[in-house]
Amino acid sequence: MTINYPNGKKFIPPSPLLKTKRPSSRVQHGKRGMRLEEEIAASNAFYLEREIAVIHKKPTPIQVVKVDYPKRSAAVINEAYYRHSSTTDFNGIYRGKYIDFEAKETQNKLSFPLKNFHEHQIVHMEKCQKLGGLTFVLIRFSSLNRVFLLESSYLSQFWNNQDKNDTRKSIPLNYIEKYGYEVYYGFQPPLDYLKIVDQLIESKNKRKGDHCGE
């Protein structure tokens, strides 16, 4: 099936990532060749089955253009367009909190390019955060086999300043290491990112308690 963007450009799906060598000094057990979104989906299935959280991949609506009927009982979509740009990849409910996040990967070893994001995604996360939601990005450095959770507020700082005074257009790895949280691989779930979300919730609750006590 051919899927095109609204401007008529043909959509070419990304090829699977190459298997990466696991550093011997790190205890990481990511499934080699598995994409980050697949690891998140497997983790979400684990959370759902055990009634820990309900988090799903957001579907992207398409406009069907051409359909063939090779058999009377089956229709085959041969051409379609994305109806509109998607916001973020995943959203759901955990511990009574709305969470909304994007998943991104890079082969870079020292920084994460901002060009991997889009303006509407940044705006969407900022609005969700303003209304009390937990918003973040899961970033995988594929060649290093490392995954980090970075709150969207830190991403917004880089995004909003990238055109000022020739500010760099990528987020350095050492910045992500300092202000983000590394998510380690396991068996079940394969990527337990909700452990980090627990820390974010507790941190926000503590700040709220400190503010009320003033």
Image (cartoon, grey):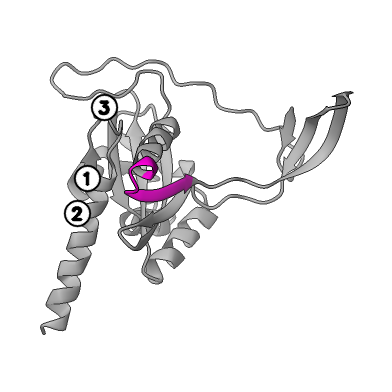
Tell me the residue that label 2 is attached to: 199
Q: Nearer the viewer, residue 6 or 169?
A: 6
Question: Is-magenta flag for residue 190?
Answer: no
Q: Residues within 10 Å of mark 1 (few under 14, many from 20)?
A: some
Name the residue at 15% across, 68% down.
206
Question: Is-magenta flag for residue 54?
Answer: yes
Label drawn at residue 181: 1
Where does the N terminus fall, quadrant-wise? top right
Question: Residue 14 location in percent, x, y?
Answer: 55, 27
Real-space Cα distance between discs 3 and 1? 19 Å
Left or right of 97, for residue 180? left
Q: Residues within 10 Å of mark 2 (few under 14, many from 20)?
A: few
Tell me the residue that label 3 is attached to: 187
Q: Earlier in the sequence, mark 2 or mark 3?
A: 3
Left or right of 63, for residue 112? left
The secondary structure type at the circle numbered 2 is helix
Q: Amino acid at mark 3?
A: Phe
Q: Nearer the viewer, residue 108 or 166?
A: 108
Which mark's residue is nearer the viewer, 2 or 3? 3
Q: Amino acid at mark 2?
A: Gln
Q: Which residues are magenta?
A: 48-56
The secondary structure type at the circle numbered 3 is loop
- Looking at this rendering, what residue extends furthest in the bottom direction? 214
**Callout 1 touching callout 2 (CB < 8 Å):** yes
